[in-house]
């Protein structure tokens, strides 16, 4: 069994308090080792999570864990033994330590929900509350399978979007570096040559030389302004006050709007379906699905739905007032409620928008590529004209 570190506080043979770190397979093993060493343990806590705090647990890690957990429960393996066997094979140090802590808490008599809720920052509210409802309803195996599938799809969607945006980001970055190199190292050489010849310079050349001089003189302020802009944008994006306004602005970008809406609706319906299957009520499920969508506009719509359903309205009636949800989604959810198959209809809608987002992500390069080609050609043409027009004038004077 792999060894974990445990922080302990104990009383030694002289009656004095002592503390330290001990390596053991689990908390009980640590207790036995301390007792054998003549110490009376007062507190034993895993130090592994703290040590591996920098190791990030991704959605892919959680999806893999959830599928494994569901299979072990389906095989009727005790939860504690199953979690420890998963932990022993886990390569992510932080996740391995968390699983060992969770198994220790369950072995001590806590429920699965209470054990994982101590690590809510890693699992997330949706995960914890879904497991809580599934545990209470006795439907853990099915819900964990659906939860793992949902996390798989979220990971695939995020990967598709990142892959689609990687190409334009790389091209724009390369262009920025190339232009900056020209402005700092190449343009000044030409400027010295033109000034020594006393040639009258055309407007594009004067603008380029002026811009080059500004960059070389105030480069620290330019870098600072870029860094400050990035910091302010990130802070505003995380601010509850500014995030909705920025979300509205981003949704005005034609190519991006449809993909962001598809991602939000996919997450919303995925979480709504899984939480309803686990036994969570419609009102709470709507609230959790809205928060999980990661889009303020979608969250506003879900809050309206939640409030109206909480006041006694039927979901099919109140969906009409949702401006962010597409008509297709509203019709399908209404049909699902009428047929008493809302969780299944949520899956249908989620799969539809998964396909839509995947298709749109692949089309981004097709849409952006002509725009980028024109932009690149424009930048190259301006720089080339600014540099070579004086050279052509110089050639005509010599001739």
Image (cartoon, rainbow, N blue to C red):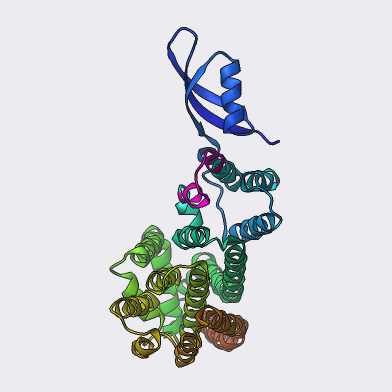
The relative height of residue 274 versus residue 313 in the rendered view (above or below) is above
Q: Nearer the viewer, residue 198 or 157?
A: 157
Asked if residue 380 lies left or right of residue 87, the reply is left
Predominant SS of the magenta segment: helix
- Quarter assignment of residue 201: bottom left
User: What is the count of numbered marks?
Assistant: 0
Q: Position of residue 385 (x, y in %)?
A: 53, 84
- Quarter assignment of residue 348: bottom right
- Quarter assignment of residue 21: top right
The residue drawn where x is 50% and y is 77% is: 269
Tell me if residue 20 can be seen: yes
Q: Please provide the residue range marked out in magenta.
A: 104-117
Q: Position of residue 89 (x, y in %)?
A: 70, 46
Q: Nearer the viewer, residue 365 or 399?
A: 365
The relative height of residue 101 versus residue 275 in the rendered view (above or below) is above
Question: Does the stretch in magenta take in 73?
Answer: no
Q: Quadrant of the N terminus?
A: top right
Asked if residue 34 lies left or right of residue 320, the reply is right
Q: Position of residue 53 (x, y in %)?
A: 51, 44
Q: Position of residue 268 (x, y in %)?
A: 47, 75
Tell me if residue 202 can be seen: no
Question: Does the stretch in magenta take in 114?
Answer: yes
Q: Quadrant of the C terminus?
A: bottom right
The residue drawn where x is 65% and y is 55% is: 73
The residue drawn where x is 63% and y is 82% is: 362
């Amino acid at each position: 069994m792999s060894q974990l570190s445990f922080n302990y506080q104990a009383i030694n043979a002289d009656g004095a308090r002592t503390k330290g770190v001990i390596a053991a397979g689990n908390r009980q093993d640590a207790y036995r080792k301390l007792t054998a060493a003549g110490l009376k343990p007062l507190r034993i806590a895993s130090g592994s999570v703290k040590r591996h705090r920098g190791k990030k647990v991704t959605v892919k890690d959680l999806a893999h864990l959830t599928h494994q957990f569901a299979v072990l429960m389906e095989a009727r393996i005790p939860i504690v033994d199953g979690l420890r066997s998963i932990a022993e094979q886990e390569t992510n140090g932080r996740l391995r330590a968390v699983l060992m802590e969770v198994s220790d808490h369950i072995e001590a008599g806590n429920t699965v929900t209470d054990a994982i809720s101590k690590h809510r920052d890693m699992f997330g509210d949706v995960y914890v509350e879904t497991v809580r409802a599934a545990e209470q309803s006795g439907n853990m195996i099915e819900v964990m399978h659906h939860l793992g599938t949902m996390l798989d799809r979220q990971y695939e969607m995020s990967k598709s979007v990142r892959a689609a945006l990687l190409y334009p980001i790389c091209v724009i970055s390369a262009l920025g570096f190339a232009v900056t190199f020209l402005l700092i190292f190449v343009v000044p050489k030409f400027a010295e040559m033109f000034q020594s010849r006393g040639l009258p310079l055309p407007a594009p050349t004067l603008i380029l030389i002026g811009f080059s001089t500004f960059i070389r003189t105030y480069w620290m302020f330019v870098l600072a302004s870029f860094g400050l802009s990035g910091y302010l944008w990130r802070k505003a994006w995380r601010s509850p006050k500014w995030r909705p306004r920025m979300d509205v602005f981003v949704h005005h970008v034609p190519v991006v709007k449809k993909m962001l809406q598809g991602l939000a609706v996919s997450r919303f319906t995925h979480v709504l379906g899984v939480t309803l299957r686990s036994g969570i009520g419609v009102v709470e499920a709507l609230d959790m699905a809205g928060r999980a969508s990661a889009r303020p506009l979608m969250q506003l719509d879900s809050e309206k739905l939640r409030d109206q359903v909480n006041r006694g309205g039927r979901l099919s009636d109140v969906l009409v007032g949702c401006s962010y949800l597409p008509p297709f989604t509203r019709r399908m959810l209404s049909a699902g409620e009428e047929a008493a198959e809302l969780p299944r209809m949520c899956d249908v809608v989620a799969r539809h928008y998964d396909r839509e987002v995947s298709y749109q992500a692949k089309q981004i390069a097709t849409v952006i590529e002509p725009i980028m080609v024109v932009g690149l050609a424009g930048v190259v043409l301006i720089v080339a004209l600014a540099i070579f027009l004086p050279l052509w004038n110089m050639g005509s004077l010599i001739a």
